[in-house]
Every structure is written in C-alpha cells, then in structure tokens.
Amino acid sequence: MNYPKVYASEQGCPINLVGNMGQAVQISIHAPSQYICANCERILPDWKEQPFLWVVIVLQQSQYKLVEKTAEIEAEKERLREKFMRFGCDLVFNLRDRGYLTDLIDPRTGYPLMSHPGAIPHNDTAVVKALLNYPVIKNKCSVLVHPNWGTAVYPSILISEAPPILIEWVTKDIAPMHGWNEIG
C-alpha cells in the first residue's frame, strides 16, 4: 500500500480544536501503522481486505497528568472517554451513512464499538507512539507524553476506509456540536 505519511489539510498539521472548558483537542489522519496492517483482521474481523484504511487520532488535553491512579484522575479519564465516544459515534455514523466502513475503538477495552471484537485488542497508545513518535512512559499502564501537554493527554482512535479529505470535512463539521471549535 502506498499511503502518504500523514494527511491533514495543512501539510501534516493536525486539526487543532479547543473545547468549552479551554482544553485543547488535536485530530490527525494517518495511514495505518504496521501493527494495524499486519493485524487488521485480528482487531476488526468483519473488515476483510480493505484496500485503504485510515487511522484518525484524537488527542484530548486532560486537566490532570494521567500517570497516577486516583479517583480524580479516573473520573477525568472517564469524562474524556465519554467525550470521545459521543464525538466518535457521530463521526462513525456520518461516514457509515455515506457508505464507508468506519469504527471507533473503545479506549478502555481496545475493542471496536460497532464491529465484532477481534481476537486481540487495539492499543491506542502504541499506535500513537508509532504514528506520531510521541514518547511513552510505562508504569501500571502506558502513558503518552505529548510535546506540549506532557502526560496530560488522553488518546483515542477511529479507523475508516473513507478518504482523508472526507474524514477531515466531517470532523470539522461535527466538532462544534461537541463543544470543540477550530483554532485559527
């Protein structure tokens, strides 16, 4: 497969958004990592021989560093997960309504939400590390280190066969409905 390394409107720059509470959100569209290419049918068994797949990385800035396990941090992770799930479901259904196979990966379980779960879970942190080359701290769970937000970052993933320009257009169209507005 011959994919460009990263796709977004401004030569590889992510879609930069800001939420109602001032937290940053970065969304970028990528060709799949080697892991996804090698294990697609084990992660998404319903998806047989898709000629092109795109990985949509959604990074939300957290109010807290996500390195410890406290009630406050777990509540923040759940809030960010729910925010992603609401946004992700809208994006998934919009693209599916247009005839494109699309799914989101539940950040808690690593399994797809709309498709049958595969034999192995998806690892959002590993894919972000592979595609964006962000460092990872390994403690009880793997934690990303964002270049601007440090460990206050919550990663999420969607996978789609829709063309990147359509994913970008739909993303920008529905983001404001979730309180995410484009910067600049």
Image: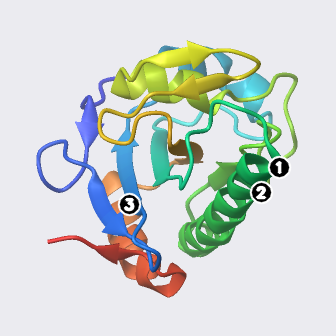
Asked if marks 2 and 1 touch (Cβ < 8 Å), the reply is: yes
Q: Is residue 124 above or below residue 83?
A: above
Q: Of callouts 1 and 3, which one flags the residue occurring earlier in the amino acid sequence?
A: 3
Q: How many marks?
A: 3
Q: Which residue is mark 3?
A: 24
The three-letter code of the residue at mark 3 reads Ala
Q: If the image is split into quadrants, where does the N terminus sit?
A: top left
Residue 4 placement: quadrant = top left
For image coordinates 72% across by 22% down, the residue present is 141
Q: Of callouts 3 and 2, which one flags the residue occurring earlier in the amino acid sequence?
A: 3
Please tell me whether mark 2 sits on a helix, a strand or a loop: helix
Residue 52 shows in the view = yes
The three-letter code of the residue at mark 2 reads Ala
Residue 50 placement: quadrant = top right
Q: Is residue 50 left or right of residue 1?
A: right
Q: Is residue 148 above or below residue 96?
A: above
Q: Position of residue 171 (x, y in %)?
A: 41, 69
Few, some or many residues within 10 Å of mark 2 (<14, 14–19, 20+): few
- Which-is-in-front pick, marks 3 and 2? 2
Q: If the image is split into quadrants, where does the C terminus sit?
A: bottom left
Q: Position of residue 175 (x, y in %)?
A: 44, 76
Residue 165 shows in the view = no
Asked if marks 1 and 3 touch (Cβ < 8 Å), the reply is: no
Q: Which residue is mark 2?
A: 75
Q: CA distance from mark 1 to mark 3?
A: 23 Å
Q: Position of residue 5 (x, y in %)?
A: 26, 28
Q: CA distance from mark 3 to mark 2?
A: 18 Å
